[in-house]
Amino acid sequence: MGQAANKVSTEHQTIGKHKKPKQIKRKKTKAITLNNGRTGWYFATPWIIGLLLFYILPLVASIYFSFTSYSILQPGEFIGFQNYKELIHDELFLKSIYNTVYFAVLFVPLSIISGVALAMLLNMKIKGMAVYRTIFFLPTLVPHVAIAVLWMWLLNPGFGLVNGFLDMIGIKGPAWLGSEDWSKPSLIFMSLWGIGQAVVIYLAGLGDISDEYYEAAEVDGANWFQKTFHITLPLLTPVIFFNLVMGVIGAFQQFTLPYTLTQGQGKPANSLTFYVMYLYDNGFKYFKMGYASAMAWILFVVIMILTVLIFWSSKRWVHYQGK
């Protein structure tokens, strides 16, 4: 019995010796993990402070200001939904909505169609393609102000190159930016000139499509149109989906080009007064910051609803490789 008891106690001591190093290792691992976590938070602290001060705080403040008569010069008073009620009866507000929706409805589909078409052309295996790709990407590097000045000269109804070319082929060109009917189509055309960034994204998407799909289609006797509409476009839908979301958001936030073209006046006849332009004028020209905050939140809600609808519909038309 004594020998058995000594044997058991010896085994317990041996197990205890094996457990202690493991426990020490676990404690060290936990300490290192906690230390790394603290270090990560220390490095992230400047970003968190910036997020709170320059994003979260202004966001919360703008919600409150939208229910007040606040201006930059006066603190204002709480007026409830008065700003939102006034917006409904504001003719220029409604005009800016029409101009913005008109631009978005035409520009976004055209930018996707022309972007995909250009990307497919620039994806062809021919000599000097890198030069062509660079040429189409260059307009995106030009500042919007410079683009506006350039196109003001090109679309000048008297001595512009566009109307000069149309005269050569016997067509009388319109007034373009000076016409209420042609001002928004002119802006859409100018915006399409700078879709090089989207084209680069489409090119990356085309490069991600495996050649095996095209080889199998050739074996089955598929022609170019069948390959395009049954392979290329379906497998490019994730990229189209991304550019669609970004295009809608960008279209509803159109500001720099029309503001530069019209010196902030939206002429002719407010045909180029876009939503964000009118928001900017209310906030920083008329100092109606509460009114502008209400406009900003309406825009936020509209963009969120459109984004959610696009995400909801994407389940039906976006196809991913391997699924």
Image (cartoon, helix red, strand yellow):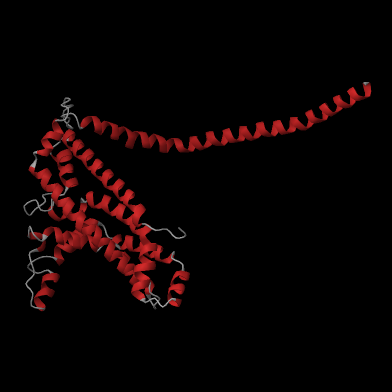
Q: Is residue 22 above or below residue 168?
A: above
**Residue visible at 43% across and 72% down?**
214
User: Is residue 259 at all visible to an observer of this figure?
Assistant: no
Q: Nearer the viewer, residue 216 or 140?
A: 216
Task: Give the side of residue 147 with respect to residue 217, left or right.
Answer: left
Residue 29 position, x and y percent, is: 64, 35
Q: Nearer the viewer, residue 8 or 46?
A: 8
Residue 245 position, x and y percent, is: 31, 52
User: Is residue 285 at all visible to an observer of this figure?
Assistant: yes
Q: Is residue 131 above or below residue 311?
A: below
Q: Is residue 65 above or below residue 101?
A: above
Q: Nearer the viewer, residue 308 or 153?
A: 308
Q: Is residue 289 above or below residue 101?
A: above
Residue extending farthest to the top is: 2
- Disc count in the image? 0
Q: Which quadrant is the C terminus positioned in?
A: bottom left
Residue 83 position, x and y percent, is: 14, 33
Residue 255 position, x and y percent, is: 20, 50
**Residue visible at 21% across and 31% down?**
65
Q: Which quadrant is the N terminus positioned in?
A: top right
Residue extending farthest to the front is: 220
**Residue visible at 29% across and 32% down?**
60
